[in-house]
Amino acid sequence: MDLKSKFVVAAVVAALSVGTVNAAPLVIKFSHVVAEATPKGQAALKFKELAEKALPGKVQVQVFPSSQLFGDAKEMEAVLLGDVQFIAPSLSKFDRYTKKVQLFDLPFLFDDIAAVDKFQHSADGKALLNSMTSKGIKGLGYWHNGMKQLSTDKDKLKRPEDVKGLKFRIQASDVLEAQFRAVGANPQKMAFSEVYQALQTGVVDGQENTWSNIYSQKFYEVQKTIAQTNHGVIDYMVITNAKWWDGLPADIRKGLEQAMEEATAYGNGVANEFNERDRKRIAEAGKAKIQELSKDDVAAWRKAMEPVWKKFEGEIGKDLIQAALKANK
C-alpha cells in the first residue's frame, strides 16, 4: 500500500472513530398525565436521572408531565405507534389488552400496600408485565399510587348496607362497576377532573381514592366520612413498545432495566410517604371524619364482594387470584 492509500485509510478510520464517539444519544420520551410533584412524577424524574447516569452519552430521557405531550385518551396509541417510548397508565386501563390485570381491581383482595408489593415482586406478578407482548406492550414495572379508601357525604360508613342506594364515582372498569352494584350502590363513570364538583353539588354521593388524591384534590372538604377500607389499589404499570424494546442494544436495555428498578423502589417509597402524610393532614383538618373498620366490618365487606370475585374469576384466572391472596400472609 503506497503512502497516499495509507493516509486515506487512516483518515477513514479516524472519521469512523469520531463518529462513534460523537454518536447522538438515543432520545427516550416519557409521557405521563400527572404533575411532577406526585409520586409518579417524582419516579419519572428519578428514572431520567438514573438512566442518564448509567448510560452517559448513550441515552437522553425527556420527561413530559401533566399531559404536555399526550393525554389519557391518546397515550396508549402513542406508545404503540412509537411516538413516545414510556408511559405509566393506571392498571385499570389495561383490561382491553389483557383481562388478567383486572386482578388489581378486585375489591378487598390485598390487605395492605405491603401485600401488593409482595405480589408484584413475585413470579406471578412479574409475569403480568409480559402478558401483553402479543399486543405490542411490554411492562417494565409497577408504580404505586396507594390503597383506596371509601368516602361519602353520609355520617355512617362501616358496613356494605351503609352505601346502598348511593351514587359513587368510579374509573372506567367493569370490575369497579360490579363492585358497587354488589352492594346496591350506583356506580358513575366520570373523569377524575370532574369529581370534586360532582361531590360538591351532590351529583355523586361518594368516591374511592388514595389518601394523597383525596387530600390533593380536596375531596375531604366535600365529604363527611372517609372509611379506612384499603379495599383496592390504584397503581400504574410503566410500559413501552415491545418491538422497540427488543430492538435495543443489550447494554442499553440492561442499563434502562436497572434504572427502572431503582426508580420504582424510589417512587413507591415516595407514594407510601405521601399517603401517610396526607392521611394525617386530612385528620388534622377536621372536615371529614375518618372511620376505621373492625375485622368484622372488613369480613362483612369481603362476603358482600364474593359475587364480584366469582364473576371475574374466569377472565382473571383462579390460580392468579390465589397467588395474590398468598401475599397477605
Image: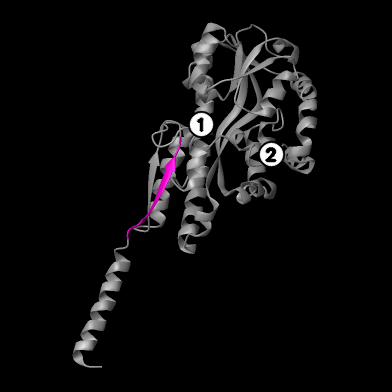
User: Percent from the top left, x then y, of residue 193?
Assistant: 48, 21
Question: Along the line of sight, which residue is nearer the eye, 209 or 101?
Answer: 101
User: Percent from the top left, x then y, of residue 180?
Assistant: 70, 19
First to last magenta residue range = 24-32
Q: Which residue is mark 1?
A: 273
Q: Which tag is nearer the camera, tag 2 or tag 1?
A: 2
Q: Amino acid at mark 2?
A: Lys
> Residue at 43% across / 37% down in the picture?
42
Q: Which mark is residue 99?
A: 2
Task: Give the crowd class for mark 2: few <14, some 14-19, many >=20 residues within 10 Å.
Answer: some
Secondary structure beneath dot 1 equals helix
User: Percent from the top left, x then y, of residue 283?
Assistant: 54, 15
Q: Residue furthest left?
A: 4
Please state if 161 lies on the left or on the right of 207 as rendered: right
Q: Quadrant of the N terminus?
A: bottom left
**Colour scheme:** one colour
Please state if 224 lies on the left or on the right of 107 as rendered: left
Q: CA distance from mark 2 to mark 1?
A: 31 Å
Taking the magenta stretch, the answer to whether it contains residue 111 is no
Question: Along the line of sight, which residue is nearer the eye, 81 or 30?
Answer: 81
> Residue at 78% across / 30% down in the picture?
311
Please state if 300 lies on the left or on the right of 51 as rendered: right
User: Percent from the top left, x then y, of residue 14?
Assistant: 26, 75
Magenta-drawn stretch, dominant element (helix, strand or loop): strand
Task: Give the crowd class for mark 1: few <14, some 14-19, many >=20 residues within 10 Å.
Answer: few
